Amino acid sequence: MIRPPLSLLVAGLAVLIGMAGLVRGSIPQTAAADSASSVQTAPIVVGGAYVREPATTVNAAAYFTIFNTSDTPDVLTSVASGAGAAASLHSETASGGMKITSAGLTIPAKSSIALSPGKGHVMIEKLYGTLTAGQTVNLQLTFARAGEVLVTAPVVGLLAPAPTATGPK
């Protein structure tokens, strides 16, 4: 019987452990929380997140719905993404245009706000590479009360339907 060298066995074990970490890391935070046996609902839940495949390699727009399950309003104070050099929150103006929302976005207590085409989005600027359908983009949303909420948004094709946002369970 031929035995593989010990170094080969150690290397194989390291690969298996690394693969397990990749699989666990690919589970969205909300899915991981759903599988835990907890009774509490997070104060801020984000659903229906997606990034529309951009027409250029410069900027991309992310959309999602924010659900505030708490009895207190909260404010989305900042956004960040590893997909580009900067990210900013844009909202609709009274005249129907878009502007940067530097003061943040207030989500009323026991309510939700949807960022959707024509109504608001997170602009990811100076993309580090081409975004194509099937990829994912990580977003870090920072709230005044709830703190950081990490979101994984799939990139969907130009003509593909947008994901549907479901509220908290």
Image: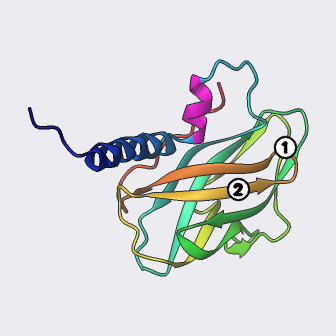
- For label 1, the residue is 108
Front tag of 1 and 2: 2
Label 2 sits on a secondary structure element that is strand
Give the extent of the magenta segment.
29-35
Question: Tag on residue 165?
Answer: none
The crowding category of the residue bearing disc 1, from other C-alpha atoms within 10 Å (few below 14, some 14 to 19, many at least 20), is some
Render colour scheme:
rainbow
Mark 1 residue type: Pro
Residue 37, image x, y percentages? 65, 18
Mark with earlier residue (1, 2): 1
Task: Judge whether 155 appears above or below 107 on screen.
Answer: below
Most frequent secondary structure within the magenta stretch: helix
Q: Residue at x 72, y 74 (%)?
A: 99
Residue 92, image x, y percentages? 70, 66
Q: Nearer the viewer, residue 16 or 153?
A: 16
- For label 2, the residue is 141
